[in-house]
Amino acid sequence: MARLVRRLFVNRNIALVFWGQVVSQAGDSIYQIGLLWLCLDMTGSKSLTGLIASAAFLPYLLFALPGGALADRFPRKAIMISADGARLALVACIPLLYALGAVSILKLALLTFLIGSFSAVFYPARDALLPELATADELPHAKRVDPDFMAARRAAGSGAGGPAPALVGLRHLFSFDAFTFLVSLAAVAAIRAARPPAPPRPPATPWRAMLDGVRYVAANPLMRVIVLVTALDNLILMGRPSWACRST
């Protein structure tokens, strides 16, 4: 327990990132459940619901590498604030369309894809920012924060996501998720860098940076295994709630 507390409160900045992300990612878990319930309610089709679920995860395949290249070239904090602001506005469109009776599967798929696209940009910037927020002694503990994000997200999202649609209605699930992005945005905005960012790398086009990353992974057996295990974890474990809802 003492080790967990030490990781979560490495310093003020790490605590801000952690708690902002716990709230935001718990909202995301509830959003995913609400999204699938809404699709099923609108269409009654498991196939269309599965396509909407795919629209939520496809951006990670398409934009994770470009997101990493952006995080290497632009201020990470600014990227995170911009991505949170965009996701807040996009998620807020869902309850608004729902209230106006103007929501459709096509609009929902487009909003879902855009939300996932900004998430794919946010997370590389977050991971690249963490080393700037901790001293050399604090960094080993700060690196353990990401697994803690996942554990806290699953606990909070799973606990609230099940009964939430019946208790507050589908519309307000999306309103709550929009609010969680506001919490995350405020937490990121309150961060004060503990030390200056690393000197900029030699100029390279984003395309060249992505190709260099792919070549590095392809040439390193250990990295190939890590990427494969991570892909399987994202496909099987992280995607499990969505597919479980789909099959109901």
Image (tube, rainbow, N blue to C red):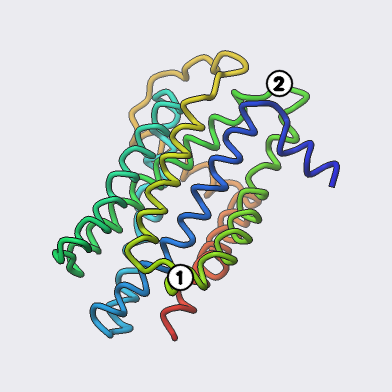
**Viewer-nearest of labels 1 and 2?**
1
* Residue at 45% over, 78% down: 245
Amino acid type at mark 1 = Leu
Q: Quadrant of the C terminus?
A: bottom left
Residue at 37 percent across and 25 percent down: it is: 204
Q: Depth check: 81 or 176 in front?
A: 176
Task: Specify few, some or many for label 1: CA neighbours under 10 Å numbering under 14, 14-19, or 20 or more.
Answer: few
In the image, is 45 to the left or to the right of 10? left
Residue 200 locus on image (x, y percent): 47, 17
Frontmost residue, 219 versus 149 = 149
User: Is residue 6 placed above or below 114 in the rendered structure?
Assistant: above
Classify residue 126 as left or right of residue 87: right
Assign a secondary structure to mark 1.
helix
Image position of 82 (left or right of 136): left
Instruction: Kindly identify the residue that appears in the image at 57 percent across and 66 percent down.
Output: 158
Q: Residue furthest front?
A: 167
Taking depth in this image into account, of 130 and 170 the one nearest to the observer is 170
Label 2 amino acid?
A: Thr
Q: Is residue 78 above or below residue 168?
A: above
- Element marked by disc 2: loop
Residue at mark 2: 135
Q: Position of residue 82 (x, y in %)?
A: 35, 33
Q: Kindly indicate whether the residue at mark 2 contacts the one at mark 1 (C-beta within 8 angstroms).
A: no
Residue 134 image point, x, y percent? 67, 24
Residue that appears at 51% across and 24% down: 190
**The image quarter in which residue 77 lies:** top left
Mark 1 / mark 2, whichever is N-terminal: 2
Q: Which residue is mark 1?
A: 167
Label 2 Cα neighbours within 10 Å, binned few <14 / some 14-19 / many ≥20: some
State the count of labels.
2
Q: Considering only vertical position in the picture, is 212 above or below 201? A: below
